[in-house]
Amino acid sequence: MKNIKKMVFGIILMFFSTYNVLADTLNLKELGFGNGGFGPLGQTCSKVLGTTVVKIIHGSVGILRIAAVIIAILSAMFTLMGAVVSKDADGLKKAEKKCVIMGIVLLGVGIFPSVVTLIASVFGFDTTCIF
């Protein structure tokens, strides 16, 4: 029962980590929380940097997030494989702890864009060029 609660909680957290929070979604612009741009002209991020640079940044951030997931999965596989093959109970507990820590880090990687977007929208910054 305890493991089922952990698994359900993890699935709920993963669901919420995939949802990007935007200023338009929360209607923060209507509440007066910033103009959503840069400087007194209120330029958007893509106007300042250009569309090509924005595409490069989007691609780079996406590649880094995907690479983090792949590296974590491979690391967890090799950690668990060594503990299971050696049939070591202590090694398996250490591998389990390492996998939980990697899961928490991956959750942070998943939630990070939403948190940055929310904070930036409250202070009136446009982060559409990053995430």
Image (cartoon, rainbow, N blue to C red):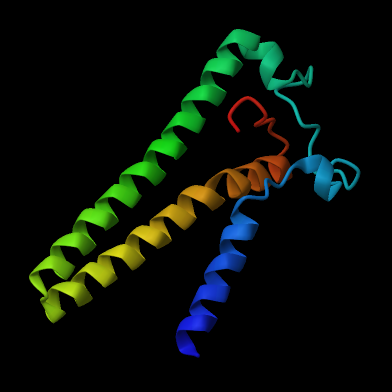
Question: 20 and 49: which one is in front?
Answer: 20
Q: Is residue 54 above or below residue 117?
A: above
| Residue with the most extreme front position | 85
Q: Residue at x 61, y 67 (%)?
A: 12
Residue drawn 91% across the image and 43% down it: 30
Q: Is residue 130 left or right of residue 19?
A: left
Most foreground residue, 116 or 89: 89
Query: To which quarter of the image does residue 121 belong?
Result: top right
Residue at 22 percent across and 63 percent down: it is 80
Residue 53 in the image: state x and y as whole percent.
56, 12
Q: Relative to the observer, which residue lies in front, 29 or 104?
A: 104
Where is residue 119 drawn, in percent x and y? Answer: 64, 47
Q: Is 101 situated above or below 2?
A: above
Image check: 111 left or right of 119?
Answer: left
Seen in the picture, residue 40 relative to 89 is either above or below; the reply is: above
Q: Specify whether 32 is left or right of 82.
A: right
Q: Is residue 54 visible?
A: yes
Image quarter hosting the C terminus:
top right
Q: Quadrant of residue 94?
A: bottom left
Q: Is residue 50 visible?
A: no
